[in-house]
Image (cartoon, rainbow, N blue to C red):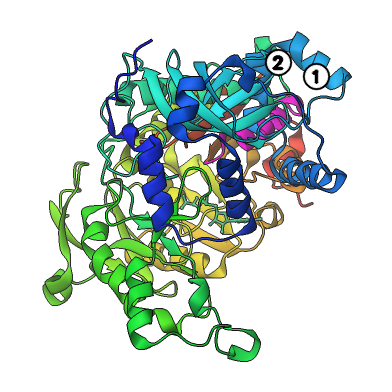
Amino acid sequence: MSASPVPSAAAAASTSAAGAAQARSGSSSPVHKRARRDEADAPSGSAAATSAAPSAAAAPRTEPTKALAARKRGRAAQMAKFGVPPVEHDVRRLLGADVVARLEAEGRDWELRASGEVCDVRIETLGSGGDGLAKAPSGDWAIVVPHVLPGELVRVRWWSNERMWSKADLLEVLEPSEKRLPAPCPYFGQCGGCQYQMLSYDEQLAHKQLVVERAFANYSGLPAELLPRIGATLPSPQQLRYRTKLTPHFDLPRELRRGKGGRAPKGGMPSAGEVEQIARALPIGFDQVKGNGILDIEECIIATPTINEALPRIRQGVRDRIASYKNGATLLLRDSFVKNPAADGAAATEVVLDEAPAPAAPREELSEVITDHKAVVRERVGKIMFESPAGAFFQNNRSILPSLLSYVEAALRALPAFSSESQESRFLVDTYCGSGFFALSLAHLFSRVAGVELSAESIACATRNATLNSITNCEFLAGSAEAIFAKIKFPAERTTLIIDPPRRGCDDVFLTQLLRLRPRLVVYVSCNVHTQARDIGQILRGEPRYEVVSACGADLFPMTYHVEGVAVLQLRDEVPTPATDSAAVAP
Ligand SMILES: C[S@@+](CC[C@H](N)C(=O)[O-])C[C@H]1O[C@@H](n2cnc3c(N)ncnc32)[C@H](O)[C@@H]1O
């Protein structure tokens, strides 16, 4: 066994780096306290490293009933929103059906296993959430470890108890994988933001393809023979410096927290000098991997250069005004094209766009950072300029948006149901349309377009964006997604319906009405491939019969475990279309 140093910045995951990060973190929530107590109970990193042994497969301990009930409630809350957590599927696959059945039958699936034990484990697989999975030395429990790769022998410390698995810290990579690369980010290993900085981009894409496949296998409820074939993941032209939105946050240090009615903090208000010291030490950034509070981040290499240029000024602004905050806060930094570069260009940064620009558009544009939630953010995708409320949703990776649109357009054009119709006889319904990204970008393919969206502010922007870009065939409606079904009068057999919901996916009301409308084609885009697979499964099992004609992941979030799902469905030909279908069906 080689104790070679970790050949990447993941060495930051070593105990010393983690300790330094912890020293800079300011959180004191109960979760953090518990984690620290666990560490205090455990042997020190170096001593434990030499004595790491299978004995770490600790004998189960007794847990107070209330604590166990709280753990079960936490999982039940997640189940209600998203279904079985993806990691549980990964754990079941790792342990195997026999072991899982035994744990469940013996009532040992919620056992209390971890309390700071250190052990060496071989990582067997990479889970859907970006963490590696290994079997505990006992063989009947899983250990989930961040920033590791399959095949690696790693030294870990377990610190939390979940159902049939425990989370663990990575202490050391004892035998690195050949696939491990030096991570470009100095915070990798400590920051909870990125999971894959040590993995080549091709490997990231291949893994995300597997994640989408597993999502359909685990969540669609479809038999194996009906699972869709998942295509290669759509790559992002930029793998770093792509994020146009960053939300670093901070907790207000205890010494500055006021009591009820604005009363001075318990020990009295610190002096100006003390406040300055507290402000200087304040971590402003992202959650640490283990939940040890916030890691101070001076630069985020997946964010755009414009954001990184503004970050020091915005962080300093927080420090200067720290005594005026009542609580911690989440900051907003959005990269926005400058409306009038000639007038506003002084403080803005030149952006070179990756995609081929529209003939009339400039090759280079200026961008600036917007921090006010109520302000307007500008984004150009291909020929179209979008305005959206800074506090509302807009896609965060500008470099991949042209290829995402091209993928959808090519997938539709490949279908006779679409290509045999002229533009004048095609209709588009864009549900969960935000500021009109899909509706306006694809409007040239359709005769008429209708969009629906819950946020009235976003709808106002969508309507304005149509005018700004001289697009005259789009209408937008503020309301819940299913409200569109009662409004539109498009012929269902010539209608394409886009679904792009938030992470929780669609509800039954929406899916039921979609099936009643029977649009000829459905494009489902989602930032949560698990709820997407669940919803597509429900559509495919319903009446009338749909089939998936193409599906893949799109890498809107390189270096992280997130993957966007894109799927195109069509109504199956053998299903006769009732005569009433040529008019929209009111609910
Ligand atoms: C993932 S975003 C997609 C936005 C848009 N398609 C785009 O690409 O910019 C999901 C959108 O759904 C909206 N939304 C959430 N719940 C909704 C509901 N029940 N009905 C309609 N829109 C909803 C959110 O406000 C958000 O704008």
Residue 219 vs residue 76: left or right? left
Image coords of residue 537 (percent x, y): 69, 28
Q: Secondary structure at mark 2?
A: loop
Magenta-highlighted stretch: main secondary structure?
Answer: helix
Badge 1 element = helix
In this figure, which residue is indicated by the disc labeled 2?
140
x%, y% of residue 179? 32, 17
Coordinates of residue 175 in the picture (x, y in percent): 37, 15
From the image, tell me which residue sits under label 1.
103
* Percent x, y of residue 124: 52, 14
| Front position in the image: 153 or 409 | 153
Looking at the rendered structure, the kind of residue marked 1 is: Leu
Asked if residue 557 lies left or right of residue 224, the reply is left
State if disc 2 and disc 1 touch (CB < 8 Å): yes
Give the mark nearest the N terminus, 1 or 2: 1
Q: Amino acid at mark 2?
A: Asp
Q: Residue at image x 58%, y 57%?
A: 452
